[in-house]
Image (cartoon, rainbow, N blue to C red):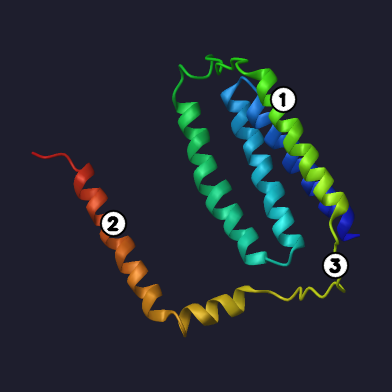
Amino acid sequence: MYDVFFYIFAAITILSAFFVVTTKNVIYAVYSLLLTFFGIAGIYVLLGADFIAIVQIIVYVGGILILMIFGVMLTNKITSVEIKTQTLFVIPTAIGVGIFAGVLIARMITANWRTMPLNIDYSTTVYSIGASLLSDYSVLFILLGILLLITLIGAASIARKED
């Protein structure tokens, strides 16, 4: 059952990443990037890395991607501009990609794959990460918070207009 979900998330990720690269409209590229990030987060969930999946969604989808969407939407002159995609070096690139794909497929076919029983612990990892942050790495966690506060104060003072 997990194989089916993996192939669904992999297909979503690969197809949307393909549309990010090939589309000429910036808004469509950003929305395709949204699907790419969600597909990667789904693969993280299947691997049992629920904390990384949540961080992927919060940081990339919730922060960076929304910032990109607002930047594109608020810049009203960029919505009608098409991305310039020139077809330079198509033949050498196709030859290079073909050689690389051939070597990769040949290596995958001839590799001596070891199979091990699937033993993934699907319990949550957030508790163990939180416990280690507040016990073993508490000093580093506090120093990182102070460094981020200093950075925020510095950015606010630089952005403030001088009278």
Q: Nearer the viewer, residue 85 or 111?
A: 111
Going from N to C along the chain, the mark reached first, 2 or 3, is 3
Compared with 155, 89 (above or below) is above
Which residue bears the numbered disc 2? 151
Q: Is residue 157 left or right of residue 26?
A: left
Question: Is there a contact, CB below 8 Å, between mark 2 and mark 3?
Answer: no
The part of the image, by quadrant, that contains residue 161 is: top left
**Quadrant of the frame with the N terminus:** bottom right
- Label number found at residue 94: 1
Q: Is residue 102 left or right of residue 94?
A: right
The secondary element bearing badge 1 is classed as helix
Residue 42 position, x and y percent, is: 73, 54
**Quadrant of the frame with the C terminus:** top left
Looking at this view, name the residue that lies furthest to the left: 163
Q: Is residue 83 left or right of residue 21?
A: left
- Label number found at residue 77: none
Looking at this view, name the residue that lies furthest to the bottom: 135
Residue 136 position, x and y percent, is: 46, 84
Q: Amino acid at mark 3?
A: Arg
Going from N to C along the chain, the mark reached first, 3 or 1, is 1
Looking at this view, name the residue that lies furthest to the right: 1
- Residue drawn at x 55%, y 16% is 84
- Residue drawn at x 77%, y 38% is 101
C-alpha distance separating marks 2 and 3: 48 Å
Instruction: Say which of marks 2 and 3 sits in front.
Output: 3
Which residue bears the numbered disc 3? 114
Residue 144 position, x and y percent, is: 36, 68
Going from N to C along the chain, the mark reached first, 1 or 2, is 1
Compared with 101, 4 (above or below) is below
Badge 2, how many Cα within 10 Å: few under 14, some, many 20+? Answer: few
C-alpha distance separating marks 3 and 1: 33 Å
C-alpha distance separating marks 1 and 2: 45 Å
